[in-house]
Amino acid sequence: MELIVRKYGGTSLDSIDKIKDIALKTKNDIKSNKKIVLVVSAMGKSTDELLRKAELISKNPSNRELDLLMSSGEIISSSLMAIALEDIGVQSKSLTGFQAGIDTNSSFGHAEIQSINNTRIKEAINNNNTLVIAGFQGYNEDFEITTLGRGGSDTTAVAIAASIGASICEIYTDVKGIYTADPNIIENAKKLNFLPYEDMLELANYGAKMHPRAIELGMYYNIPLVIKSSFDNNSGTLICNYEDIKKLKNGGLILNEITENRNKVSGVTSEGNISKITIKNIPDKPGIAAKVFEPLSNEGINVDVIVQNLSTDDKTDLTFTVKNEELDQAMQIVNKKSIDIEFESILSGKGYGKISIIGSGIQNSPGYAAKFFNALSDSDINIQMITTSDIRITCLINDKDLDKALKKVHDVFGLYK
Amino acid sequence: MELIVRKYGGTSLDSIDKIKDIALKTKNDIKSNKKIVLVVSAMGKSTDELLRKAELISKNPSNRELDLLMSSGEIISSSLMAIALEDIGVQSKSLTGFQAGIDTNSSFGHAEIQSINNTRIKEAINNNNTLVIAGFQGYNEDFEITTLGRGGSDTTAVAIAASIGASICEIYTDVKGIYTADPNIIENAKKLNFLPYEDMLELANYGAKMHPRAIELGMYYNIPLVIKSSFDNNSGTLICNYEDIKKLKNGGLILNEITENRNKVSGVTSEGNISKITIKNIPDKPGIAAKVFEPLSNEGINVDVIVQNLSTDDKTDLTFTVKNEELDQAMQIVNKKSIDIEFESILSGKGYGKISIIGSGIQNSPGYAAKFFNALSDSDINIQMITTSDIRITCLINDKDLDKALKKVHDVFGLYK
């Protein structure tokens, strides 16, 4: 018995007709030896509408109540989907996150899945050809309803795929797949057919639409992921481990990509609305970074690029970036006693953006970094910060230069080919 | 510590402003020794909107999925209410039916409460000044979400009041209380200040707005109920046991009602859209009625007035009424083998209505029945069937005569006084 998990996002579910279409597609794709588990987001903008109601009532609603409120959006779409499936003769059943055994911690608004008690999911799969699970939600040890925050429904889908040993997890969305750059900005951006988890993780971290936590889970449990459009039959982008991609290539699927000398850059990403915080003259000793970033993390603030300058006189400067909308909260935290360190001053500024090139192996191959920096320099773009990982090089530049930089770098690395 | 349960229906919750108003009223009414538990219905017409979505998808959605779908309506209003309370500084918390421990049977769409595991409710009451519970819903032994069907939120409220030993259960709605007759039809109908459970039960059974199951629960556990308007400060109608009403009256509250010779009719009710089914020539022996009515009850069809004619030759005719919209389903059941009895033929007809006079003691007092029948006869209205209970006399007449009959009977018994 092959099990497939398919996740549908809000834009794929924003009308009754779309729900019916997905039900029909599901019916057509079920085979005698193949069952499909659907994971659904809330319909269209319904989560925003619920949030708007809460905001009309209170400027500061508690996360516990917000989570309970928002969880209803996915419950509505999952039961409607099960009704649509049953209506065309497909045995089905919907499960809430609680019923599906999605056990999370208690971080309301951005809970993390701790385990999946899949007894009920397995029972429902045995008794039905399909199963619909409300994404984005779970419950904590006190039976409180939690939501998983950004990328929540994708994460639900991948976690369930891992838990039940699905052969693949397909993420249906409003784009045709993963591109070498944002096709809204770069006209000649190319859809990628294959991508290793690592590259996708960096692409997701650095601007692409999917949230990295879902990709991380897929990578950890080695669940092949497919990102594809709900609105056409395009094959999308397959995300799996590097060895499997090489096998696919050697199998003749994309022969023209087999070359030792291939371009190792998978894509270019950018992200705007970034703020920079610099804490000047802090003691350069072990544990300092933790003292800064733990209080921020506890409040759910995502710290992104971190750079620590060279130390002089046992003092150092620590610079990191946060999203513009989290700057005020982050500044309050670092200014307060909650960070228990001495420092001289704190500087902050808005109006930055990140541009990254992503590709497995670019760190081990000479020339990629230099080519990247030259491309920016040729366009008179000043680099504020640089960070790198094994498969990514990121530059912090002015927000207003982002699109120009993206076009130039996409061209320079020949990604339109 | 005094505990009060207040239930708010959909019309009381159909806007953000109304939710805020109820939160404010709740805040004002909390005292140091008084806590308030709110039970809420879904906002305005939101349940209808969810149902409409399901109907657009399927003509015959399963009750299991519908229940899960509809339960979200009350969850939304309960969390919004908790947010509104917290926003004005009232410690609060919302609980779903599952979280509140509302354990029901598995009759999706019209589940019955089996028990309330109130551990969590009590804990929430101890930790907060108010508590908001999603009405209309519970869960069965498989942790499936159920809804309680008609009168569901009222039933939730009364059951919780009984479970936690509340001093009173207040039902806030869009009418000022219980009237001697429907004030939309009878202009000079009078609001009743007090009413024994038994009379209210009959009024509810025979046309008044509240569902009898909630009143039955209140009567069984002796929880005083108040029906009152959300939109003014009218004192509403208190429903409690007869002894307590007599005490209130002797306490001087409504002296003019203390009289041996008082009018024992509390009110007149009517209900249209009734169909009649007659099964002709069935064997007149024990167990026959059960064989007819059990299959109907199993399918959730409410049989109302039942009349069995006098027996001739060990054969008898059995006549009963159902709602118009349930006639087709009822006819299918009685025509099928599911009733295991011999009969000659089955007749059915639509277009009937019931009119009833209600009052504790009217069966023991001469003259009420005759006065009632005469009133109808004087208006040239033909009586099709008659049934009576200790505190009620009901006539089945033509639907089109209902309003005329109601006016006449209300006048004849002087209920406008």
Image (tube, coloured by chain):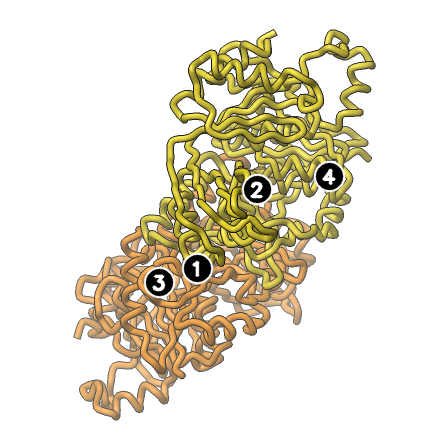
Chain colours: A orange, B yellow
Is tag 1's residue or tag 2's residue first in the polypeptide sequence?
2
- Front residue of A148 and A362: A148
Q: Is residue B262 above or below residue B172?
A: above
Q: Are marks 1 and 4 on the same chain?
A: yes
The residue under label 4 is: B220
The amino acid beneath tag 4 is Tyr
Which-is-in-front pick, marks 2 and 4? 4
Q: Is residue B14 above or below residue A77?
A: above
The residue under label 3 is: A85
| Disc 2 + disc 3, Cβ < 8 Å | no
Q: Secondary structure at mark 1?
A: loop
Is tag 2's residue or tag 4's residue first in the polypeptide sequence?
2
Percent across and percent down for residue A277 are: 51, 55
- Front residue of B363 and A269: B363
The residue under label 2 is: B152
- Front residue of B155 and A370: B155
